[in-house]
Every structure is written in structure tokens, then in C-alpha cells.
Image (cartoon, rainbow, N blue to C red):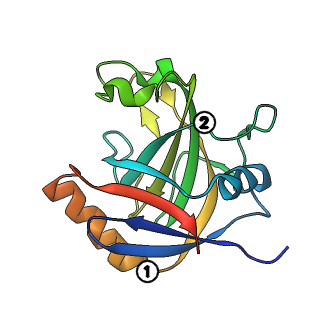
Amino acid sequence: MSDRFVEVSLDKRGVACTARLLDDKAPATCAAVWDALPLGGDVYHAKYARNEIYALVPSFAPEGAVPGLENPTVTPIPGDLVYFAFADWQLGTASHGYGAAASHAGHRAVVDLAFFYERNNLLLNADTGWVPGSVFGTVVDGLDRFADACQDLWRRGAEGETLSYRRA
């Protein structure tokens, strides 16, 4: 299989980077994401993991094809794209602050498509403990400018911004 690439963008800020899918390390996750593209939504900056932005989307893999944990990590590095699957109740607590966004109009599963832009991340949630995710992509172009935009999002706020994933 030849390499497949996705463009990750912060739409309001007008910045994007390109990531290569890790089909050899996370084949089921890459297939599910690729088949569902384009994906995206309101961007959030992580409270717990540190240097992470993400969008919550309804579960998109067909029943029976939902990927399990592949290429797992609890210490993502800059440029990692990471897939997390959660039941709606896991994100529905007041401490998370998502409100209705955690249930996505009655969907029972929510996918967190995350982008890590700097070092020293640790996927440890005070409510639930370790939160391993599946690394399914790595940035190959544009990490520095995208990381600058992520830092701007942290400092200036995420309101009105969207995080999008599309085929490149």
C-alpha cells in the first residue's frame, strides 16, 4: 500500500499541516479514519494531557469494524495524531464541560481525534486514570507553524475555531 496523507487544519486561523497515516502500525484505525474523512468539529485544548488539541466527533466506524487499541501510547510526541474512543457517559461529567457535545445527538460513542503539538504529554485523567490512545498518524510537513497556532489557541482561546481532518 502506498502512503496516505491527511491535512489537519485550524480553519479560522488558516493554518494546516500534513500527516502520514501509520497504516503499518494502526491499520484498522487508519482505515476507519480514512473512510470517514472529512472529519472535524469545534476544537478543544486539553486540560489534562498538556499540549493537545482535539475535536469530538460521533463514532464513525461501521458496527463490527470499530478499531481497538493499536499502536498505543500514554506519552504522545509532537506531531502525533491519536484516536480515542469513549462512551458518551465518560465525557458527560460536569468536570469535562462538554455538555451536549459529549453525546453528539444521542450517539453512544464519541471519538476524540487529537493532535499533539509539543513534548511532555501524559495521558492521565484524574477521574479515570491512564487513557491510552491509538497513534494513527505523524506530521511530515508544517509542524512548527501548526504548533504556533496551537499555542495561540491556548493563549487566546478556542471559541469559534474548528479542527478539521481531510484527505491530502
Q: Earlier in the sequence, mark 1 or mark 2?
A: 2
Disc number for residue 60: none
Q: What element carries label 2?
A: loop
Residue 95, x across and y down, in percent: 29, 23
Q: Is residue 167 left or right of residue 46?
A: right
Which of 124 and 135 lies nearest the eye of the viewer? 135
Decide: marks 1, 2 in contact (CB < 8 A)? no
Say which residue appears at 75% left-offset and 55% top-offset: 31
Residue 100, x across and y down, in percent: 36, 25
Q: Residue furthest right?
A: 1
Crowdedness near tag 1: few (<14), some (14–19) or many (≥20) residues, C-alpha within 10 Å = some
What residue is pinned by disc 2? 59
Vertical placement of residue 77 versus 54, above or below:
below
What residue is pinned by disc 1? 142
Is there any visible trace of residue 122 in the rendered image? no
Q: Is mark 1 on a helix, strand or loop?
A: loop
Q: Residue furthest left?
A: 156
In the rendered image, which quarter contains the N terminus?
bottom right
- Name the amino acid type tagged 1: Gly
Q: In which quarter of the image is residue 10?
A: bottom left
Crowdedness near tag 2: few (<14), some (14–19) or many (≥20) residues, C-alpha within 10 Å = many
Which of 24 and 17 lies nearest the eye of the viewer? 17
Say which residue appears at 28% left-offset and 72% top-offset: 148
Is there any visible trace of residue 111 in the rendered image? yes
Which of 157 and 101 lies nearest the eye of the viewer? 101
Vertical placement of residue 48 versus 34, above or below:
above
